[in-house]
Image (cartoon, rainbow, N blue to C red):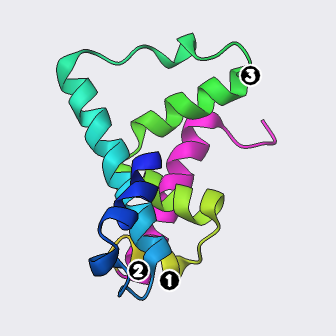
Amino acid sequence: MQEAFARPWVRWDHVGGYEKIEAWVRRVAINVAVGRWRRVARERPLPEVTAAADDSTGSDVEVLLALRTIPIHQRSALFLHHVVGLSVEEVADEMSSKPGTVKSWLSRGRASLDGLLGSPQD
């Protein structure tokens, strides 16, 4: 993650002219994280999520396992919208897609997670 904040510093003559530098940094952070994940996945299998930190609750592990099963676009859209707090239009801009596509990813991602985790009433 620190790399995403260091890259603009090194390339400020180029990045400084961008209208949305914060969005560029988020995109770099996502790309760095995905690149590292892919590199690790090629080298060795990922450890099971159930071996997560001791301070994780059972529901945290269930959510992590469920998130692993949904497509990356849905996962990214859910993260940017619900965790980062971006609007649908901002998520669309961030992910270089249309707002209708983002709405579809959000809807499908929520439905998938609901099916995997069950509704709060269960």
Residue under the image location 55 percent in, 32 percent down: 64
Q: Nearer the viewer, residue 95 or 15?
A: 15
Residue 32: x percent and y percent? 33, 47
Q: Residue at x 40, y 80 (%)?
A: 93
Q: Earlier in the sequence, mark 3 or mark 2?
A: 3
Give the number of the disc on residue 89: 1
- Residue at the image position 45 percent from the left and 51 percent from the top: 75
Q: Is residue 109 magenta?
A: yes
Q: Is residue 16 left or right of residue 49?
A: left
**Mark 1 Cα shell of 10 Å, populated few (<14), some (14-19), many (≥20):** some
| CB within 8 Å, label 3 to label 2 | no
Across and down, in percent, residue 18 comes to: 37, 85
- Give the dominant element type of the magenta stretch: helix, strand or loop: helix
Near-viewer residue (62 or 20): 20
Quarter where residue 114 is shown: top right
Above or below for 69 versus 21: above
Mark 3 or mark 1: which comes first in sequence?
Answer: 3
Callout 2 amino acid? Asp
Highlighted range, magenta: 98-122
Name the outermost residue toward the right.
121
Q: CA distance from mark 3 to mark 1?
A: 33 Å
The amino acid sitting under disc 1 is Glu
> Badge 2: how crowded within 10 Å, few (<14), some, or many (20+)?
some
Which residue does the numbered mark 2 point to in the structure image?
93
